[in-house]
Each structure stands twice: as structure tokens, then as C-alpha cells.
Image: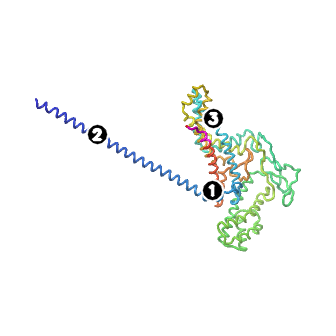
């Protein structure tokens, strides 16, 4: 009995010791598993960081490569003459002044309309939330649609702008015969309605002119032949000029090949030039062309590359005039005095708006409006609710609280959204292409209803041409577009910095 009592403490001690060993082993295994999990997390974290750094480095390198290639090709063409020049079918004489002015016009119009409407809509949706159930459902419906509109392709906005602004749903006539006009028109010589006023010879058998002022005599500047006023549709002229550009480019390529490869001279060169002229589909008399072209090509024997292209450009100038006179006899580009369609006062206004600067700006407003609304809402939500409650507790009204407290506190975020929106607007080409189209415009807009072009359209036009010279000036246009974008963003960043209050 004594022996059994002596063995019991020893057994309990052994059981306690074995239980402690199990607990130690459990804690050790738990630490080992935790260490393994921590090691796996660290490996995954390092791998993810390496992937992120690689993606960021690759993106930066690609961006640097693109910008570097554009700078190398276009920086040499940036000059004051290039900035103030007008588009031309000769790359060395082309400029960007109409596109720059048109871009500034439409971006300023878009900003003037989109910023107050967007910020006001964000304040209404965020600060004046309804409490009743039907109005809450309508609020949610509007919010859902604004969120979805931010992802709609810009081409759809172009079609919407064409219908809603350019044509005003057809409710007020057409652009050629508007239902409402306001403003004083001033014209150089004569008035036109929807066409281009040109001078055409009186004795032409097919001349059925719309005489604007039949009592006033007009004469050709060179031959002093009597002329009358005729209205020509601008669409037909633009199509003819596009076909002329294509045929002249084909003729230039054929002649360059003849001079550089076949080494023809004398009568063989005459026949080759006439054959190239016919294959290109040109309409002017090839016999009269050879008298001016062949001597220049004889001088170009042995030339190649840039020298040959420069010689061909010099030779094609009289050819272009002759072919223009052959294809467009009513316009007579070499002798007559074509006038613009509607030279009006700066405050001229009509309904429907037509495909003018105002329509382009309003269409861009539709593109950037959802971005401004969403970013302004997020900025208003970021303002602390205690500031609103403190202002209301001090006796301020709802609007005073918004104007004095909430809106100033959200301006940095609102300006960030405006910067992103204007960055998108200045580079948009699809909606402007729907409104303005690829047109040959050599003048800057003078009023809100005037025709226009923009930098993205002009760059696209040059980049789509086969000649490398136009690709170089397209790179210069891209540089100028980036500079204009930096100016717009710089002004917005400056306003944001000045609006931030020190803490």
C-alpha cells in the first residue's frame, strides 16, 4: 500500500513532463509553420515587386523611345514659319496656324461649358441628396448613367454632337438656310449662301452663274476677260483637290523612278513623262507640260534622295496649277479671286449651329463632362463631414456651407479631374473628325460658326501621306500638340496650387 502511494506522484510527474514536451513541440512546429508562411509571403512580395518594377520600367522605356523618335524627326521642322504657316500640298511650305487656332478655340469652349456644368452637377448630386424614395431612385438612375457615360467611346459623342448641335435635330432648318441668324455680315466683294463665290468667264457655255451683283463688272486679272460670279459647292472642290493630290503623288513617284532608274534623256524622256502623265490620269495637255518639266528633269539626271525630291517639288508647282485649271475650270485657281463662304462679324450666330467651332467645342464638352462630374464628386466626398456640421452649427445655410467650406476644400481634387479631362479633350480626334472631317482649310476661324480644323486631324492627315517629308512635319505637329497640352495642364496645376491652403 505504501509502495503504490509512492508511485503515484512519480507517474503524475512523468505525465506532466510528457505533456510539457508536447506543448513545446506544438509551439515549435507553429513557429516553424509561421516562419514558412512569412518566408512565402516575402518571396511573393519580392516577385510582385519585381514584376511591377519591370512593367513600370518597360512602360517608361517605351515612352522615352516614342518621344525620342518624335523629337529626332520633328524638332528640326519647328520654326516660326511652321507655326504661322498654313497647310500646303508641299511639305516644306506647310504650317499649322489654322489647326493651332482651331484647337485653342474648341478647347476653350469645351472648358467654359464643361467646368461649371460638371462642378454644378457634382454639387447637386453629392450635397443635395434627396430623402424621398422616388427622388432617391431618380438620383441613383442619374448617377448610374453618368458613371456609364464615362466609358462610352468618343465616336458616339461625335455622332451625338452632329445630331444635337450641328443639325439641332432638324428643327430649325439647315446650315445653308438656317432658321435663325444674328450678327452683321461683312464681305469682301459679294455675298454667297452655302457655297464658294468664284469668278467664271461670261462666254462659257455651261456657265449658269448665281449673279450676286450682276450690275458690277468683274474682269480676269491677267486677260481682262469679262467675268461673272458663280457659287460652287465646297464639297465638290474638296473632293477634286483630294483626287488631284493623289494623282500628282502617283505622277511624282513615276517620274522619280524614271529619273533615278532608267536614266532617260532627249525624246525618250519626253515619251516617258507623257506615259507617266497618262497613267496617273492627269487631264492637262502633256505637250504643254513637257516644255516646262523636261528641262528640269534633265538637270536632275544623277540626283537621288532629297535633292531629287526637291527638284520634283519645284517642277510640280506649274503642273499643279495647270492640272487645277483643267479639273476645276469654274474655280480658276490661277487667275480668279475665290472668296470664303461666310465672312461675318465675330458675334455672328445662327441656329442650327452647323459644323463650326461652337459645335466642335460643345461636342468635346460632352466627352469630358462625365470625367469632371465623377472627379468633382469624389473630391466633395473627401471633405470631412465635421467641417460641414461645424459650419451648420455656426448658423450658416446649406449654400453658404458649400460655397465657403466644402467647395474650397475640394478644389485641388476638382482641378485634378479638370486636368485629366482637358488632357483627353486636346488629343481627341474621333469626335472632331465626325464634326469637321478631313478638310483642306487654310484659314483660322474668325467666329463661332466658322469652319475649323484641329491639331489631331492635321497630324493624322500628314501621317497618312506616303511621303517621308509629311511624316517629319507630322512629328513636329505632335511636339506642338504636346507643348500645348503642357501649357493647358500647367495653368490648371498653378490654379490648383494657389487654391490649396497651408495646413
> Relative to 49, is 122 on the left or the right?
right
Instruction: Tell me residue 375's x, y (percent).
Output: 58, 39
Q: Distance between the residues labelled 2 and 3?
A: 64 Å
> Relative to 61, is 187 on the left or the right?
right
Q: Are circles 1 and 3 on residues that touch, CB within 8 Å? A: no
Instruction: From the viewer's side, name the closer residue of 7 and 434.
Output: 7
Determine the residue positioned at 77% across, 49% down: 341
Determine the residue positioned at 79% across, 41% down: 183
Q: Name the residue under label 3.
A: 120
Q: What element does badge 3 sit on? A: helix
Q: How many residues crowd around disc 3 within 10 Å: few (fewer than 14), some, or many (20 or more)?
A: some
Q: In this view, does 69 lie above or below 300?
A: above
Determine the residue positioned at 60% across, 25% down: 395
State which region is magenta: 495-502
Q: Mark 1 points at which residue?
A: 475
Q: Name the residue under label 2.
A: 26
Q: What element does badge 2 sit on? A: helix
Amino acid at each position: 500500500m505504501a509502495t503504490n502511494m509512492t508511485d503515484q506522484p512519480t507517474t503524475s510527474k512523468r505525465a506532466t513532463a510528457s505533456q510539457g514536451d508536447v506543448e513545446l513541440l506544438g509551439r515549435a512546429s507553429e513557429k516553424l509553420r509561421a516562419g514558412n508562411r512569412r518566408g512565402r509571403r516575402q518571396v511573393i512580395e519580392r516577385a510582385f515587386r519585381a514584376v511591377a518594377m519591370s512593367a513600370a520600367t518597360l512602360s517608361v522605356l517605351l515612352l522615352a523611345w516614342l518621344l525620342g523618335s518624335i523629337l529626332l524627326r520633328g524638332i528640326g521642322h519647328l520654326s516660326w514659319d511652321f507655326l504661322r504657316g498654313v497647310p500646303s500640298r508641299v511639305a516644306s511650305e506647310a504650317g499649322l496656324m489654322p489647326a493651332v487656332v482651331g484647337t485653342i478655340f474648341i478647347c476653350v469652349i469645351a472648358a467654359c461649358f464643361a467646368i461649371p456644368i460638371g462642378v454644378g452637377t457634382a454639387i447637386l448630386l453629392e450635397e443635395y441628396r434627396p430623402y424621398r424614395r422616388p427622388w432617391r431612385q431618380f438620383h441613383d438612375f442619374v448617377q448610374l448613367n453618368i458613371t456609364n457615360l464615362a466609358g462610352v467611346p468618343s465616336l458616339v459623342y461625335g455622332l451625338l454632337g452632329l445630331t444635337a448641335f450641328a443639325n439641332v435635330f432638324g428643327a430649325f432648318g439647315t446650315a445653308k438656310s438656317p432658321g435663325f441668324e444674328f450678327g452683321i455680315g461683312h464681305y469682301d466683294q459679294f455675298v454667297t449662301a452655302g457655297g464658294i463665290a468664284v469668278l467664271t468667264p461670261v462666254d462659257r457655255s455651261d456657265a449658269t452663274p448665281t449673279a450676286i451683283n450682276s450690275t458690277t463688272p468683274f474682269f480676269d486679272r491677267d486677260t481682262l476677260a469679262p467675268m461673272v460670279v458663280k457659287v460652287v459647292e465646297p464639297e465638290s472642290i474638296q473632293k477634286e483637290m483630294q483626287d488631284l493630290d493623289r494623282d500628282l503623288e502617283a505622277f511624282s513617284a513615276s517620274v522619280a523612278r524614271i529619273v533615278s532608274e532608267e536614266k532617260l534623256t532627249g525624246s525618250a524622256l519626253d515619251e516617258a513623262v507623257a506615259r507617266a502623265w497618262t497613267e496617273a490620269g492627269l487631264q492637262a495637255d502633256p505637250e504643254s507640260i513637257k516644255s516646262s518639266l523636261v528641262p528640269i528633269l534633265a538637270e536632275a539626271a544623277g540626283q537621288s534622295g532629297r535633292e531629287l525630291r526637291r527638284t520634283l517639288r519645284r517642277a510640280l508647282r506649274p503642273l499643279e496649277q495647270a492640272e487645277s485649271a483643267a479639273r476645276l475650270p469654274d474655280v480658276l485657281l490661277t487667275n480668279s479671286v475665290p472668296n470664303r463662304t461666310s465672312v461675318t462679324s465675330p458675334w455672328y450666330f445662327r441656329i442650327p449651329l452647323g459644323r463650326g467651332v461652337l459645335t466642335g467645342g460643345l461636342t468635346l464638352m460632352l466627352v469630358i463632362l462625365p470625367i469632371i462630374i465623377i472627379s468633382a464628386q469624389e473630391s466633395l466626398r473627401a471633405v470631412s463631414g465635421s467641417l460641414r456640421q461645424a459650419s451648420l452649427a455656426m448658423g450658416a445655410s446649406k449654400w453658404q456651407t458649400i460655397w465657403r467650406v466644402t467647395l474650397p476644400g475640394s478644389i485641388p481634387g476638382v482641378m485634378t479631374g479638370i486636368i485629366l479631362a482637358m488632357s483627353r479633350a486636346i488629343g481627341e480626334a474621333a469626335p472632331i473628325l465626325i464634326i469637321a472631317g478631313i478638310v483642306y482649310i487654310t484659314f483660322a476661324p474668325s467666329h463661332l460658326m466658322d469652319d475649323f480644323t484641329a491639331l489631331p486631324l492635321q497630324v493624322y492627315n500628314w501621317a497618312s501621306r506616303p511621303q517621308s517629308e509629311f511624316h517629319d512635319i507630322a512629328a513636329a505637329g505632335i511636339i506642338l500638340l504636346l507643348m500645348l497640352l503642357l501649357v493647358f495642364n500647367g495653368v490648371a496645376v498653378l490654379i490648383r496650387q494657389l487654391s490649396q491652403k497651408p495646413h
